[in-house]
Image (cartoon, rainbow, N blue to C red):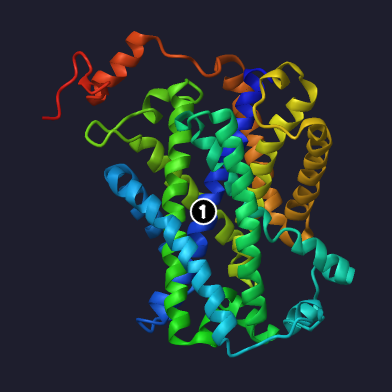
Amino acid sequence: MGNRHWGWWTARLNLGGLVTAVAGINWAAAAFFNRIVLQEIFGAVPTLGTQVVVMAAITLVQVIINVFGIRLVAFLNELSVWVHVIGVVAIALLLFAFAEFRNGPGFPFRIEPGDPAIAANPPFWGGLGIFGAFLLGLLQAQWTYTGYDASAHTAEETISARRGSANGIFMSVAASAVVGYILLLAITYALPPIADTIAADASGTPAVAYTLIENLEGLGVFLSFVIVVAMMLCGLLAIASTGRIIFAFARDGGVPFSHVFSHINKTQRTPDVALCTAGLLAVIITVYAYVSARGDAAAASVTIAIITGMSTALLYWAYGLPILLGLRADEWRSRRAWTFGGRSRILAVVSILWIVVISVLFLWRPDNEFAFRGTAGFLILLVVYYALWAARSFKGPQAMRSEELLARERKVGETIHGDVAPGAVSAD
């Protein structure tokens, strides 16, 4: 639908979004870990600085597993599905059945004062009343939904990918909508007093963990630990995906020092340098958000808002470029296998407009200025990088000749149809 330049920008925006997504996942996992493990089990009083250290430690472990435990990653991938499914079902059922706080059906529509400090100095959307709250609420699912492109990441390994990957994207959104809505209803139904929940969240106890513990006590602690495990598994797989994208860019000559970033671990056959780079970049993004937010009274919440704002905007921009190109080009339409027919153009226009709306809500809010600054800084780096190097040097994805493929296989001892590649060293 577009040329190599469009592909370059789409890929880089997607990579920026994925790196910040890893940062956001692991920052949230660190928040739960601090509250459930360090505080609840060991009696420590972790600070926001502790959360940065824990986030970096979680990321380091995930990188090590991805580099040296490829079979373990495959097992944990399947385990992650069951942890998420069973965990969500268990939380919803237990809250509906045994919650100490039981809010009525009118509770979601009731207006209550929250944090007195916020009421005394409301952010810009606070002056808009219900409409402002509605606009802010639109963002609730957007960062979660960014994960639907995982089906696209695995397209090369998908049978009938043109249909299968598109169907996977659609079903992931549909399933997340249904299951996520049930979970949100359960948490809202059992939500403790608003002011207490906000105060707990500002002090470092995630609102969901606070809700579970206040309602289910010891069982709530266990369920919160399940959430920790689920997020760590999610971060593990996010690093796997991000690292392989960096490797793919390097393999195609899409980054300077491609020979470094396309390095393959000879023993494990994993893109070790690319995986380490993904983890390091995620930690750097987290440190930027932490330093930007640490002077705020609600620094923990502001930090995650900065990270998720950047991640969501970049990922949706990456999704929006192919949609825009699809509106401009017609030759690909005869080859499409998954389509909405005549409604496609209308949905494409609506999608682009929606991306514009959420970009404004995520980035151009006065109370989230550091997300805007971080994203703007990243775009400036991309523009400079593109002008000085990529515009002339990037040739687009290159199909390997058979001798090039054999050379790579020899380098890592790869096999061809069960036989060791000529010149490779057998693993036996």
Q: Is residue 183 left or right of residue 157?
A: right
Q: Look at the picture and state if 34 lies above or below 274.
A: below
Q: Look at the picture and state if 91 lies above or below 10.
A: below
The one nearer the camera, 69 or 167, is 167
Amino acid carrying label 1: it is Ala
Give the quadrant of the C terminus. top left
Q: Is residue 233 left or right of residue 426?
A: right
Please give the count of numbered marks on the rendered protein.
1
How far across and how far down the image is residue 165, in percent?
56, 36
How far across and how far down the image is residue 317, in percent?
69, 39
Q: Is residue 43 left or right of residue 360?
A: left
Which quarter of the figure has residue 329? top right
Q: Look at the picture and state if 264 lies above or below 106.
A: above
Give the quadrant of the N terminus. top right
How far across and how far down the image is residue 418, in percent?
23, 23
Read off the residue under disc 1: 23
Which quarter of the figure has residue 343? top right
Q: Look at the picture and state if 310 lies above or below 6.
A: below
Q: Is residue 262 left or right of residue 288?
A: left
Disc 1 is placed on an element classified as helix
